[in-house]
Image: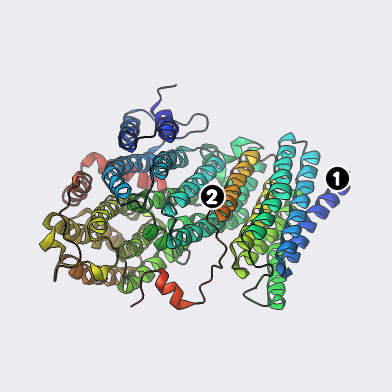
Amino acid sequence: MMFDPVMLILIIPALAAAILAALPGYRLAARVNVLAALLTFLSALALLVTPEHAAGFLLVDDLNIVFIVLTTLIGFTTSVFSTGYIAHELETGRLTPLYLRFYHAMYQVLMFAMNLALTANITGLMWVAIELATLTTVLMVGIYRTHEALEAAWKYFILGSVGIALALFGTILVYMAAQPVVGEGLDAMRWTVLVENVAQFDPSLLNVAFIFLLLGYGTKVGLAPLHAWLPDAHAEGPTPISAVLSGLLLNVALYAVLRFKILLAANGEAIAPGPLMVAMGLTSVLFASFMLYRRRDIKRLFAYSSIEHMGIIAFAFGMGGPLANFAGLLHMSMHSLTKSAIFFSIGHITRIKGTQKIAEIGGLTETHPALGWTLVVGVAAIAGLPPFGIFTSEFLVVSSTFSREPLLAVAIVLGLLVSIGALFARLNGLAFGEPLGATTPDRMSYLPIFAHFALVLIAGIWLPPALVVWFQNVAALLG
Amino acid sequence: MTNFALDVSHLFAGSLVLLSLMMLYQDRMFGLINIFALHAIALTLAVSWQGYIQNAPSLFLTALIAFTVKAVIIPIALRRIVVRLGVDRTIETVVGIGPTMLAGMGLVALSMVVMLEVTSAADPLAREDMALALSVILLGLLIMVTRRYAVTQVIGFMSIENGLILAAAGARGMPLIVEISVAFSVLVAFIVIGIFLFRIRERFDSVDLQALDRFRGERR
């Protein structure tokens, strides 16, 4: 039992956090961080070959394996990126060694919290884990202690806590709905038990519960109109944390919404959760795509793009059905990989230029060809141009919507086109045109970025049949 | 016995709602902190009573945590913050007291209507407890929206939290309540320490659009 991979993905980050909190040297700490993240990723891969598991407090099924593998993979690549990035923060004096120690320990606590949220079989435990993840990211967002960083952290904290509080009320209501049927105690909070018995639950109680859960966890997903914390938190925190926030934490919150959606869908008499998610998703897409035009800060630009993509994903899962669910899963994976790679390259860019203002960065392809073209590729991928994976998933979302609700498809296509225009308008100044800002050469590893782009490109050209079958199973599970 | 149990639990939960409404019209910082301490004491009594009638010893632990953290430690810490950081002693509200109170009453009515409707099948003890708990949560949100200081927002958040603990205590036999209240206490402790360490004393308001644009790095 000790070497059960499910336990490993929780024990390794927890242990690593304790070790990193005690390690003084930052070079060694960065290496330990990478090693721990790699081991966690390998244990997550081991989950793929072990049979399903639903004992005690933890649950592993087809649905959460997708999330776990994605989380641990990006957790690992981000830790590799973070070694180079953080060394520079120390040189420029933005962070002191003590804060760096804190940063590394918090990174592993965050990994632990996300893995716990994804594997928890108890609704209450999942809530505690998401709260822990919120708390660690708040601390990381405020780590530079500038006025802006503190204000961003405070905003994130207040909105995140209110979201978390609403989600807890929803969780309590689900328990109340389950308690007369399942009986008192932990069983009334266990996913596996809940799903089996949900048909007998009181539908009106479930309806109210889902509203609270959608609003609560939806705040953490960053769905409009509850997104206000997201751009600030992305812009003011360290770039590796922006990558983890966009690539992973938003997904974890979405996973929570999906679990409860499955519950409601299985009840039969409760309201259909889909239309609510479609409405919030579509609002996010349209709102964020227009907001992209007015951005002057490069990290904020891509933070709004994350709102847009989370909107697309929520929209796809809200539409439901095998094809849209499949598209949602694919889009989620592709967005996580692409967006974190973009944040990695933004980390390099802002490090060289010493600014995040779009107006002060220019002509990157001329001065830093590798970096400039990486950004071009990244923006092309995130905008949904072929041959990248996001094109495939967006195409699936749109085509599956067209056959069922043509009007909604028109709205979402409008959002996609508007965002493509905005992203390329900004990219034009950043990558081409007059070189602006410092031109010091870059000496960082591009490996994490290339690895992510390679995966996105492969998925865009050829989806491995095994992956397709796996995602189809999950899509069926989502109903 | 059951009628008496019901009446007493209503008394405590109802006084929480009443104290939340009192927080809405406080315009003095110390007054607000004192009423919050009373709010926490009312929560302690309500949770202890639930622990007694449900025969659930873990609820006594929750009540103890609520009392020590929210009725004693946090109010003292907040008072010291107000004194040491020189926070304004009067509270400027965003909307006038009158409209705020009307909105508060509307929210209480709304939560009664919604919760009593949807929980018609549930046991009456839990049912009205949930309705009152939702009122406390919504009033807490209103407090957060109508105040712009860090300290007052924290108090609003903690009153939401009190509402949640009340709801959790009312749901018969709900597990993990102790864990959840510990998690919340850690959260609140972090905020209060954060306010103190980073000397967050200014107001967070977004009325001044120019300041907002400067903050976002988006001023032309």
Quarter of image, res A348: bottom left
**Above or below, B31 relative to A89:** below
Q: Would residue A229 be visible to someone looking at this image?
A: yes
**Amino acid type shown at disc 2:** Asn
**Above or below, A113 relative to A163:** above
Residue density around tag 1, few if under 14, some if 14–19, many if 20 or more, within 10 Å: few
Q: Position of residue A79 (x, y in %)?
A: 31, 41
Q: What SS does tag 2 mark?
A: helix
Q: How many marks do you count on the picture?
A: 2
Placement of the N terminus of chain A among the 4 image quadrants: top left
Tell me whether the residue at label 1 lies in contact with that at label 2, contact meaning CB atoms closer than 8 angstroms: no
- Give the chain of mark 1: B
- Give the chain of mark 2: A
Q: Would residue A272 be visible to someone looking at this image?
A: no
Judging by the rendered image, the residue that carries numbered circle 1 is B2
Residue at 62% x, 56% y is A204
Horizontal side of residue B36 vs B6, given as left or right:
left
Residue at 56% x, 66% y is B202
Closest to the observer: B219 or B21?
B219
Residue at 23% x, 61% y is A353
**Amino acid type shown at disc 1:** Thr
Residue density around tag 2, few if under 14, some if 14–19, many if 20 or more, within 10 Å: many
Judging by the rendered image, the residue that carries numbered circle 2 is A267
Horizontal side of residue A124 vs B106, given as left or right:
left
Quarter of image, res B63: top right
**Above or below, A225 relative to B34:** below
Q: Are marks 1 and 2 on the same chain?
A: no
